Image (tube, rainbow, N blue to C red):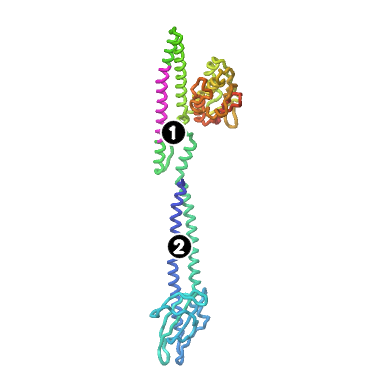
Amino acid sequence: MTSIRSRLLLWIGLPFTLVGLLTLATSYYVLSNQITETFDDMLLNAAERLERRIYSVDGELRINMHYFSISTLGSRGDGKIFYRIRDAEGNMLAGFDGLEDPPDDLDQPLFYDTRYAGNSLRAVATTFPVVRSTHSGQIEVIVAESTEARQTMINEFLLTLSVLITIGGLLAVTIALLAIHRGLAPLRSISRSLRRRSQYDLEPIEAEVPREVSTLVASINGLMMRMRQSIHNTQQFNADVSHQLRTPISEIRALAELSSRQSTDPTARRSLDEIGRIAESAGYTVQQLLTLAKARHELVDTSAMAIADLAELCREACAESISRVYQRGQELEFEERESGCRVMADGVMVRWLIQNLIENASQHAGGAQPYRGTIYVSVARSQGSVQLQVSDDGIGVSPEHQARLTERFFRASPETPGSGLGLAIVDEIARAHGATLELDSPAGQGLTVTVTFPSA
């Protein structure tokens, strides 16, 4: 797809080029005719001057002109002059006998093109009366001039005109480029403004632009407003789903637990316990689905983010997760390797990210067997970025499964509890913060998840 600049230059340059070529062609035609008429008049004038130099002495015609003076007649010394003078009987009086005869009768002066002695000539033939002592008659005079002077003058004029047109064209293109540059400045300003924004910033564009661009800006702002409304509706829908699903699932769990305590039938109690376990799993899955919906990176409003201390967010997330970790016979260790690990973040979502990483290690580090080791959480700075690491000493993940860990509902160990959404939520939150997610699992050495945030 060509740019607007290229199109404008094409539509300015192409017509100008065509006009320039048309001007050259027209100038060549008009100039050729004009120069031909001018030189033809000079040739006819030369022939008439010859007429005045012919006189009769004792019945014989004589010419009062030397051969060398004929070159001063019409060519201004730039070309060659040939002439021929004959009487009515065809007798050669003077000049070059080999000159070609005129193509038609000489009722009036006749101009024609011919060649002589390897020269291209323009000739004029005319007749005029002459009176001898005994009788009168007609004299035929032909004067021919080589065409070099005419062609040289035309070429010089066309060269001058071509240079002027070329200079004018370059000036026009330069002015057009400047005008296009100035004219497209509002579009470039809008483009820079949009590029500087986060891909999730849907605030309206505030800029003073020409009327022709204001329609585009209004359309973009309208689109952003509709997208913001769509995001708001989606978030509202998530809240409604959360309220409508969590309440009945909690009631099912409570009713199953109460019925199990009151029942004396072992089979019924086992069934009720299973119903409670399934309801608890469903409640956890619903909660994870709602968290995933809220964490979708394209729905996150980055304008609500602020500078936060990642280490402090890790402490809060560890404090919220520590009870569940201890209940499973595990330990949780947090290390702040460097201070001042500040990032631009949504604090609530980053805590979700850390909690899901801890929960993922807690539930899946041991594979089919419960994990009884330590979960390590650390924060450090690294070359203009801040790294969060969560690792364990479990069995690790095979290489063929690592690439799929962030897929929704995928679990490397299907027999372990969970929804298969934890790392998918982590991936969405990381993308919303412009962070990168790396998974590393050497054979038998556990899984290390590294999230690299841009430093604030």
Decide: few, some or many residues near mark 1? Use Cα within 10 Å; few <14, some 14-19, many ≥20: few
Q: Amino acid at mark 1?
A: Glu
Q: Residue at x 46, y 17 (%)?
A: 278
- Res. 334 image quadrant: top right
Whether residue 387 is visible to the viewer of this picture, yes or no, is no
Q: Earlier in the sequence, mark 2 or mark 1?
A: 2
Which residue is identified by label 1?
203
- Whether residue 245 appears in magenta in the rendering, the answer is yes
Magenta stretch: dominant SS? helix
Is 391 above or below relative to 32?
above
Pick whichever, 280 or 206, lies toward us.
280
Residue at the disc numbered 2: 24
**Up/down of 214 relative to 366, above or below:** below
Amino acid identity at mark 2: Leu
Q: Nearer the viewer, residue 91 or 58?
A: 91
* Tags 2 and 1 touching, CB below 8 Å: no
What count of labels does the image hold? 2
Q: Is residue 233 magenta?
A: yes
Q: Position of residue 312 (x, y in %)?
A: 55, 22
Instruction: Name the outermost residue toward the left.
Output: 107
Residues in magenta, as a range? 223-249
